[in-house]
Image (spheres, rainbow, N blue to C red):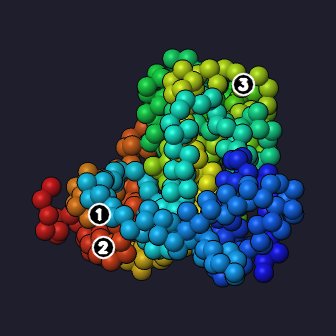
């Protein structure tokens, strides 16, 4: 018999529901395994100092979920969720083909999960969330419930961020958050700094808010601190935008020492930093966020799109120390009301039961495999990359222009975006961002890479394609 002693405080639900929740959580974490015999109901009730009927109802709820099976005279045994109710949602339901093919190849996507066990686990998480469906369809306070913020705090702590929960907010994605933050920090015509080749979404946000986005000079480690300081002397920037880990599109990561130098310049000139940490969780061990170095200056936006799934449309935001909380809450509520409670609940579930970590492990491994495929197709030194980035930055040679190349690759299954989308100042270079993720499988990706490599061997006139 398993000496199982659940901590009911780990679930916010009524005690009988909490018992079923904890059976499922402990099954996920390996504390319980298929075949384990659970304590008799009266014994567990005594152990937890609760009513026998509460435990009985909890076992019934667990049986409904397919987590346990009861046998007269033998007891209650863990079945690893193989009951019909658990299987019906996670395994038996086929995808709707009208939705299965929807994808925007212009976006930088993580590889789609393909492991059947991982997909089943993700679906089971949705099934568990559906148990609270009615309450999750209601309006809720902005910023996330207590349990959702607790999950967000635990997630952020892995990156060395340990702010109090009153500075953590769950928002409906990085884009509306960036729009709100820059709407607070700057007015039309104000100067905002960024990398000279930066995330295309930031260029769009600056244009919408009519901000004067100015690109700073860079090297292989990110923006140059001296260039930042020199620009601060000449202009009065309202903020600095950075995408410091696996930067989109150049794939570079700013090392910790450079982050400290940038933070020192920002503090000297009192320039707020907006840290778009979209890819921060992709490396297993990355530099600590700038928000951990300069918490008084930095708005940290930890989007979940690149590390878990863009369809969640969630970001974990850490507001700087000081008086920034209330203006931020007001701006976000005005523009977005709240993040979806359904997606918040799913993200929390996946973080708590380990599914989020399993997704991350898949993404890292698959991204590495795809980068290895690129290295087999293209000459070393002909492109910029990180071993686990979802894209490469490809300077064009042999007379190829970005327009002819993007047109040539249009039907390859890879997203190819011209450098114009990312260039802040001056003419764009003849280069493209090539995305390796999304729904494209390895076989088709290999064919697309071979197609691309063949084209790059000579001038565009040598390729049988229409321009």
Q: CA distance from mark 2 to mark 3?
A: 48 Å
Q: Are marks 1 and 3 in contact (CB under 8 Å)?
A: no
**Residue 120 in view here:** no
Per the image, the residue denoted by label 1 is 413
Q: Nearer the viewer, residue 24 or 41?
A: 41
Q: CA distance from mark 1 to mark 3?
A: 43 Å
State the SS at label 2.
Answer: helix
Comes first in the chain, label 1 or label 2: 1
Measuring 82% from the left and 75% from the top, which residue is drawn there? 3
Q: Is residue 248 above or below residue 276?
A: below
Comes first in the chain, label 1 or label 3: 3
Mark 1 neighbour class, 10 Å CA radius: few under 14, some 14 to 19, many 20 or more: some
Measuring 14% from the left and 64% from the top, which residue is drawn there? 465
State the SS at label 3.
Answer: loop
- Among the 4 quarters of the image, the one containing residue 314: top right
Comes first in the chain, label 2 or label 3: 3
Measuring 63% from the left and 51% from the top, which residue is drawn there? 348
* Residue 347 at x, y percent in the picture: 58, 51
* Residue 274 at x, y percent in the picture: 64, 36
Residue 444 - label = 2
Q: Nearer the viewer, residue 251 or 283?
A: 283
* Residue 360 at x, y percent in the picture: 58, 64
Per the image, the residue denoted by label 3 is 324
């Amino acid at each position: 018999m398993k000496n199982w002693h659940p901590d009911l405080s780990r679930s916010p639900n009524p005690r009988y529901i909490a018992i079923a929740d904890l059976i499922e959580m402990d099954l996920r974490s390996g504390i319980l395994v298929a075949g384990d015999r659970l304590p008799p109901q009266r014994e567990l009730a005594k152990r937890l100092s609760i009513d026998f009927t509460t435990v009985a109802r909890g076992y019934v709820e667990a049986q409904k979920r397919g987590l346990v099976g009861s046998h007269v005279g033998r007891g209650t045994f863990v079945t690893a969720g193989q009951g019909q109710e658990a299987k019906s949602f996670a395994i038996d339901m086929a995808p709707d083909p009208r939705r299965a093919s929807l994808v925007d190849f212009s976006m930088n996507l993580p590889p789609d999960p393909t492991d059947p066990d991982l997909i089943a686990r993700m679906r089971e998480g949705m099934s568990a969330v559906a148990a609270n469906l009615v309450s999750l369809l209601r309006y809720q306070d902005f910023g996330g419930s207590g349990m959702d913020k607790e999950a967000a705090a635990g997630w952020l702590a892995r990156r060395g961020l340990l702010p109090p929960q009153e500075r953590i907010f769950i928002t409906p994605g990085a884009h509306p958050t960036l729009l709100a933050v820059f709407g607070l920090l700057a007015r039309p015509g104000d100067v905002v700094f960024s990398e000279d080749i930066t995330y295309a979404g930031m260029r769009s946000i600056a244009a919408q808010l009519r901000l004067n986005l100015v690109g700073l000079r860079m090297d292989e480690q990110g923006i140059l601190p001296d260039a930042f300081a020199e620009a601060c002397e000449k202009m009065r920037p309202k903020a600095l935008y950075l995408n410091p880990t696996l930067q989109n599109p150049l794939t570079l990561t700013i090392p910790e020492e450079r982050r400290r130098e940038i933070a020192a310049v920002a503090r000297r000139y009192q320039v707020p930093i907006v840290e778009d940490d979209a890819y921060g969780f992709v490396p297993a061990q990355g530099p600590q966020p700038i928000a951990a170095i300069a918490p008084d200056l930095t708005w940290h936006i930890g989007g979940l799109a690149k590390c878990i799934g863009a369809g969640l449309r969630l970001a974990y935001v850490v507001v700087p120390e000081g008086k920034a909380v209330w203006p931020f809450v007001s701006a976000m509520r005005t523009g977005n009301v709240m993040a979806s409670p359904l997606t918040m609940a799913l993200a929390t579930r996946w973080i708590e039961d380990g599914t989020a970590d399993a997704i991350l492990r898949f993404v890292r491994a698959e991204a590495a495999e795809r980068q290895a495929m690129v290295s087999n197709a293209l000459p070393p030194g002909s492109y910029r990359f990180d071993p686990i980035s979802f894209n490469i930055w490809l300077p064009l040679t042999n007379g190829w222009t970005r327009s002819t190349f993007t047109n040539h690759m249009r039907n390859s299954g890879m997203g190819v975006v011209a450098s114009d989308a990312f260039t802040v100042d001056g003419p764009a270079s003849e280069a493209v961002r090539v995305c390796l993720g999304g729904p494209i499988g390895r076989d088709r990706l290999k064919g697309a890479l071979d197609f691309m490599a063949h084209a790059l061997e000579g001038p565009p006139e040598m390729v049988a394609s229409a321009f």
